Amino acid sequence: MRVLHAAAGLAIVLALTGCQRTSFGGFGSRDVSPGPAPLQAQPVPSVSSGQLPAPTAGASQFPAAPTAGAVTPGGAPAGTEVAAATNALDVTKESMVGNWRVSSAGSSCDMFLTLTNLGSGSRGGTRGCAGELTTMGSWEVTGKQVVLKDRSGNPIARLYKTADARFDGSTNGGQPVSLSR
């Protein structure tokens, strides 16, 4: 009988041993590392106020229009986009769907356009692009113009159909952009 009690007691002890917590950290853990040291206060410059000068008579708050020989920030002649818009071919949204090869700022990358609705446009994206085109998230066709938009729906580039499988235009920053298949 004693052997039976000893065996039962040993079984209970082994069963309780299996229920012990063996993980590290977690709730109630005393092994907490200290956080980063507190930041030291920094002096703040004083704020000043004053009256702005009156605007000059006849001055405009808008920049002057480019002249015939002007160059855009991206290096393309300023009239290039106007010429592309004037000579643009008709474009349909359905003809834009698919994979495009993009040339911009001396490099090339891929662009994918779908008909899946996203905000006011359709879903699209780029892979391997640089500059403003990395933020592309949607696109839309407005008349003869294809407008590429960032993920917030803001226009980042405008393109016009210049040949059967080619579109040319520029980014808002003035970089020339070409799409081709």
Image (cartoon, helix red, strand yellow):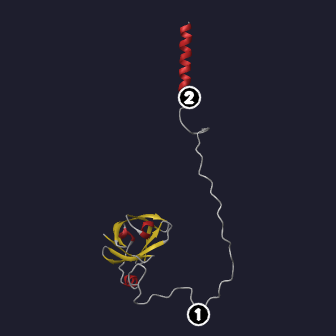
| Amino acid of disc 1 | Gly
Considering only vertical position in the picture, is 42 above or below 88? above
> Closer to the camera, 21 or 40?
40
Residue 17's label in the rendered image is: none
Task: Find residue 167 and report its horizontal and vertical position in percent.
Answer: 35, 75
Task: Determine whether the residue tagged by mark 2 lies in a helix, strand or loop.
Answer: loop
Q: Quadrant of residue 50?
A: bottom right
| Amino acid of disc 2 | Gln
* Residue located at (68% from left, 83% from top): 51
Task: Find residue 65 and report its horizontal and vertical position in percent.
Answer: 48, 88
> Closer to the camera, 121 or 10?
10
Task: Find residue 64 and report its horizontal and vertical position in percent.
Answer: 50, 88
Residue 20's label in the rendered image is: 2
> Closer to the camera, 28 or 68?
28
Q: Quadrant of residue 15?
A: top right
Considering only vertical position in the picture, is 53 above or below 110? below
Quarter holding the N terminus is top right
* Residue located at (65% from left, 60% from top): 41
Residue 136 visible in the displayed image: no
Task: Determine whether the residue tagged by mark 1 lies in a helix, strand or loop.
Answer: loop
Quarter holding the C terminus is bottom left
Mark 1 to mark 2: distance in Å? 84 Å
Considering only vertical position in the picture, is 68 above or below 6? below
Residue 85 visible in the displayed image: yes
Q: Mark 1 — residue?
A: 58
